[in-house]
Image: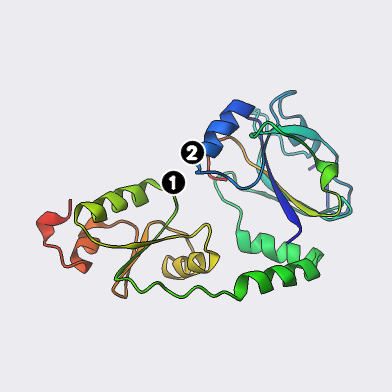
Amino acid sequence: MALSIGQAAPDFTLTSHMEQTVRLSDYRGKNVVLAFFPLAWTPV
Amino acid sequence: MQTQVLGLSVDSVPCLKAWAESLGGITYPLLSDFYPHGKVAEMYGVLRPEGYSERAIFVIDKQGIIRYVDVHDINEQPDNDLLFRVLAEIDPEAAARFSAQTSVPTTPEPAADVIMYCTPWCPGCRLAREFLSKHNIPFVEIDINRDREAAAKVRAWANGNETTPTFNIKGQIIVNFDREKVAKALGLPPWEMW
């Protein structure tokens, strides 16, 4: 595991399914739950 | 509760779009970690050699600090209650506000003979819906993804699983669409179970 608790979350910019650009650091001031999932069409 | 959920996978945007539609409109952004392939998953150390990510949860606080990491079995789904407990720990104030908001309007059990606890997309629910309509049996549906109190009831009945559909037929609980049991509880003769 490259990251552990207490570390700063690496920032990233990705495109959402609504074709919006989402940057992690835009959510500073909010708690964020990042849910990685293997592949679409599997349960979220 | 001042919390944003972001879903991430290595699928392409059109693929995620189609999937989101099939789920009946998802309320949080699904992000495409497609190009460069799995870059973010790699950054977070959850990219598998097969080229897709682990099923993993990272909770990040308001200052951008990782407060919780959970990489779980690829076949296991994250538990909403667990997530809530984690959030309550890092931001008790927001969690308290959230509980106050959600627990006040306690939804009473609808006064119906047949209640079906379901999700919009589960295939068994669709079959059950067809079955009940075919037999002109009035029923009330409760979407357990929206109604978490109802979800807790289903878990209590189904050994901790959120099995759908689960029925409450005149007080009798039937987990899963077991045609024989459902037909019997409805007072239908055995030949009417299809």
Kind of residue sitting beneath label 2: Ser
In-front residue for pair B188/B175: B188
In-front residue for pair B118/B177: B118
For image coordinates 65% across by 62% down, the residue present is: B82
Kind of residue sitting beneath label 1: Trp
- Would you call the spot at circle 2 few (<14 residues within 10 Å), some (14-19), or many (20 or more)? few
What is the residue that sits farthest to the top in this orientation? Answer: B36
Q: Give the numbered dot on residue B41.
A: none
The local secondary structure at tag 1 comes to loop
Instruction: Residue under label 1, please give it.
Output: B121
For image coordinates 62% across by 69% down, the residue present is: B102
Is B186 placed left or right of A17 in the picture? Answer: left
Q: Position of residue A41 (x, y in %)?
A: 52, 36
Chain for numbered disc 2: B
Q: Position of residue A30 (x, y in %)?
A: 81, 54
Task: Give the total of numbered labels.
Answer: 2
Is B140 placed left or right of B99 in the picture? Answer: left
Instruction: Residue under label 2, please give it.
Output: B22
The local secondary structure at tag 2 comes to helix
Chain for numbered disc 1: B
